[in-house]
Amino acid sequence: MADAVIRFENVYKSFGAHKVLENVSFEVPRGSALCILGRSGTGKSVTIKQMIGLIKPDSGHIYVEGRDVTAMNAAELSRVRRRIGFLFQYSALFDSISVGENVAFPLRRHTNLEEDEIRDVVEKKLARVGLRGIYDKMPSQISGGMQKRVGLARALALDPPILLADEPSSGLDPITSQEIDELLLDLKHTEHTTMVVVTHNIPSARRIGDEIAVLEGGRILDRGSPADLEQSEHAIVREFMTLEGGI
Amino acid sequence: MRSTLSSIAGQCGDVALFGFRILRDSFRPPWEGAEIAKQIFEIGWRSLPLIAAAGFAVGAVMSMHTRASLERFGAEAMIPAGLAIALFKETGPLVTGLLFSGRVGAGIGAELGAMRVSEQIDALESLAVDSFKYLVVTRVMACIAVLPILTTVMNFTGILGGYIAETVISGMSFALYWERAWSFVDFVDYVPPTLKTCIFGFIIGTIASYLGYNTTGGTAGVGQASTRSVVFASILVILSNVVLVKAIFFLFPGAEG
Amino acid sequence: MAARTKILVGVFVLGGFVLFAAGLFIIGDRRLLFSDSIELRAQFANVGGLKVGSKVLVSGMDAGEVLAIHVPARPGAKFEVRFRVLEKFQPILRQDSVASIQVEGLVGSKILQVDAGSETGAPVTSGALIQSREPVEIADIVRDTAETIGKAAAVVDDVEERVGKAIDTLVGVGEEARTLVVQVRGDSREILGTTKRVVGNVNEIVDGVRQGRGTVGKLLTDDEVYGKLRKTVDDVAAVAGNARSASADVKEIVADLKSRDIGGKVEAAAGNVQQATAHAKDVIATLKPSAGEERGLIDDLRDTIMNTREATSDFADDMEALKRNWFFRGFFKRRGFYDLDEVSQEDYLSGKITRGREPERQWLHRSELFDEGPEGRELLSEKGKKKLAIAIAPYLKLSPNTLLFVEGYASGGSREEQFLRSRERARMIRRYLVQRFDLKGNYVGAIPMDNVKSDWEGVSIVWFRDKKK
Ligand SMILES: Nc1ncnc2c1ncn2[C@@H]1O[C@H](COP(=O)(O)OP(=O)(O)O)[C@@H](O)[C@H]1O
Ligand SMILES: [Mg+2]
């Protein structure tokens, strides 16, 4: 509890009359990975976007490394964001610049690296997500799965201690999907990256997640290790955990 | 009815706040110099062919019309001067403003709209970049910087177009045409009208950015942002021009003559 | 960002700035902002629309601009115009250089024209006050013209009076003399007619100018005058100069009239007539008529009349010259019906003059109008005068600007005879009507209609009422 890198405290969020999150509380300890499971439209993306202040909760508090994101000014928020890598559900690559420049973008803005060093780092990050020789391709020229991996490379460009990934393996073929899982596990083990991973994929959630939270009807229905959840008091949670593929 | 009115008023207030924010942020670091330069390239340099061609055509057409009316009084010698005055004072700035609303307003509206719905703006934010400064302020600054330049290009190509139209009909030499064209132009006919396009630039950039930056509703929303940008920017350019003309008369009494 | 893009942005921004600055320099250069200049002053009671920033020309060359116009503190004082002139003009400017306010081009703005000074004038230094000439107004020219014409009219009145006196004297003589006098009277009537017409012409010129309000504006809206002006004046900037020379023309005419001593001549002529008639009286009174002497008397009279005619026709020529002066020519010609009595039958029939207006017409037969005079000439009878008065009555109620034509008709005889008679009739009736009813000469025409209708003897009086708006 003391070293919770991310902590939600009674978070409420609605869009107009549509209540998305109702009294959501949880925390992610340093170095651990939380997987958020839930059906489409239950507010998973909304939840992790709130962690970097892209969406503000109606009420409640969200602490990142002990500091309340909801009460931050732009400069403080910017500092927090530099410590967090964020992979968007639909990659959100900048389509006016090349793949390599997408990955280089945070480096150019937040480091003083030389041009060749940047190039070096970018190639390394791309290689890490299994992509080579596509530096000068435009995002529209590569497949959706590749885009997602470039997005991950961009999120990791600054070697952030925290990684938020919104469905990193959805839309990928099983092999690539598995490679991504390996990569995330590797990050957790070698760099002790704290992670929140939104996913539909139960097997990968089991593998990556130290904890799994099931979001349903605007609430965290249940939360615990994969083994705990198999014994959950909620039938729907137990049902989720038995699913072989995605939800 | 009431609610539409209040929603329109609310929108206007939003746009005004948006504009203030642009002005305020443009004085705060970081100054996205490279991005402004890039935008100047995109919306300035790439508008050159359009503006130059339009200027040429406008000049030629105006010259022909001026001829038609001045011929009646036997004042053909006044054609170049009449054209130059009309072009510098009003036609050049206004036509440039409107063409710019069309090309750049639509472009900014669509580009920012697409970035909004594809979460690229969120992505920028997630990378600890002030998307407002990076996307909006840079574009508006570029618009402000570019419009007077494009207007000047329009003015000069207009004079040139007028010359071609004139020399085809009357065979006037370029030297004489040039001499006559400038014979009545005063500083107040040239400087304030050209610089007022900075305000056009601000308006066009602000409206288009506002609509693009706040796009909702997916791809359809992007199209809407784009067309609305053109419509509102054009209308506001025309309306603000009325005020600006009056303001110039007020500030530079010599401009009225 | 690619290096190429950076270069293009630089080119764009720098190029745009240079282009804009080029415009500034072109304008500045024209306004001579960037050269050394001296400041001069001139005072005007009327600045005639000159503004701060107006151009200053020295002997027609672009030389500077007006810097300030100080409004005087008191009603009687003059406006002071301060202006800048390039230093290089200093050598030709003197304190007796004259500044005047003129129009640049025809519809152009006002400029300050400064003439070079005299060889002996004191040189100007910065701040010097130079001479000025108030702006010339067309109204002034008209005033001058009117004055001239007034003088001319006085002369003509004088002539008329004297000739009339002479004729009155003649009327008192005996039977033989009366025959003679009738002949003489015909001639003198003609003389009087000419002089009257001259006066009429002059008045019409003045009226015309006045109706045109005599302003530049009116003249310039008159296409024809405009065209004429333009043709005459190649360099439009010289319009004001020409206007001045026009007024000089008028003055010259007056001077010319004076120098020719028309009045004196007429006086002499009239004296001659009186002398001659006295002579005639003597001759008849002494009842010593001899063929030789009588012939001598007639010759004498004829000479006298010839003299008078010459004198008046000289004067008529002068007036014609005024009318033909380039400045007024177009103005009056354009009015189309100037001197309707000079309108040709062809123009009349073409409808160019009446422009589709409906004619209202009165037919008058020869027998109602004329008495048989000597040598078969027709003379307007008393009955005829009454008939004319009745016929013209409806016309007199209309606007004095309503066009009136007297059509003359004649039948029988050769074509030439027909023409001459019809013309004579038309003219006689026109002359009578104009005099008797004080009509505007330029709105009344006389047209021989010999070849239009040859079965009528007499005249037809036709007027063309203005179309209702
Ligand atoms: N910006 C927004 N405006 C309005 N509604 C939104 C917005 N973002 C998300 N929602 C709504 O919130 C709900 C949760 O969305 P999301 O978090 O994207 O779902 P998912 O769990 O599939 O990621 C959805 O019903 C969506 O329509
Ligand atoms: Mg989602």
Image (cartoon, coloured by chain):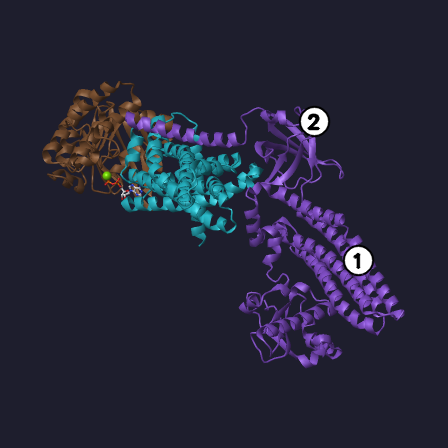
* Spot occupied by residue A241 in the image (x, y as percentages of width and height): 14, 38
Question: Please, what is the three-letter code of the amino acid marked with disc 2?
Answer: Gly
Chain letter for mark 1? C
Q: Which residue is mark 2?
A: C121
Q: Which residue is mark 1?
A: C269
Residue C181 against residue A63 in the figure, above or below: below
Given residues C264 and A9, the one toward you in this image is C264
In the rendered view of the protein, which quadrant contains the C terminus of chain B? Answer: top right
In the rendered view of the protein, which quadrant contains the N terminus of chain B? Answer: bottom left
* Spot occupied by residue C361 in the image (x, y as percentages of width and height): 62, 76
Q: How many marks?
A: 2
* Spot occupied by residue B100 in the image (x, y as percentages of width and height): 38, 40
Q: Secondary structure at mark 2?
A: loop
Q: On the rendered structure, is C89 left or right of A73?
A: right
Q: Residue at x 86, y 67 (%)?
A: C283
- Residue B177: image quadrant is top left
Q: On the rendered structure, is C417 left or right of B115?
A: right
Q: Image quadrant of ligand 2?
A: top left
Mark earlier in primary sequence (1, 2): 2
Write down the colour of chain B: cyan
CA distance separating discs 1 and 2: 52 Å
On the question of residue B214 being in view, the answer is no
Write down the colour of chain C: purple
Write down the colour of chain A: brown
Residue A214 against residue C154 in the figure, above or below: above
Question: Please, what is the three-letter code of the amino acid marked with disc 1?
Answer: Ala
Given residues B78 and C311, the one toward you in this image is C311
Residue C333 against residue B225 in the figure, above or below: below
Mark 1, ligand 1, within 8 Å: the answer is no
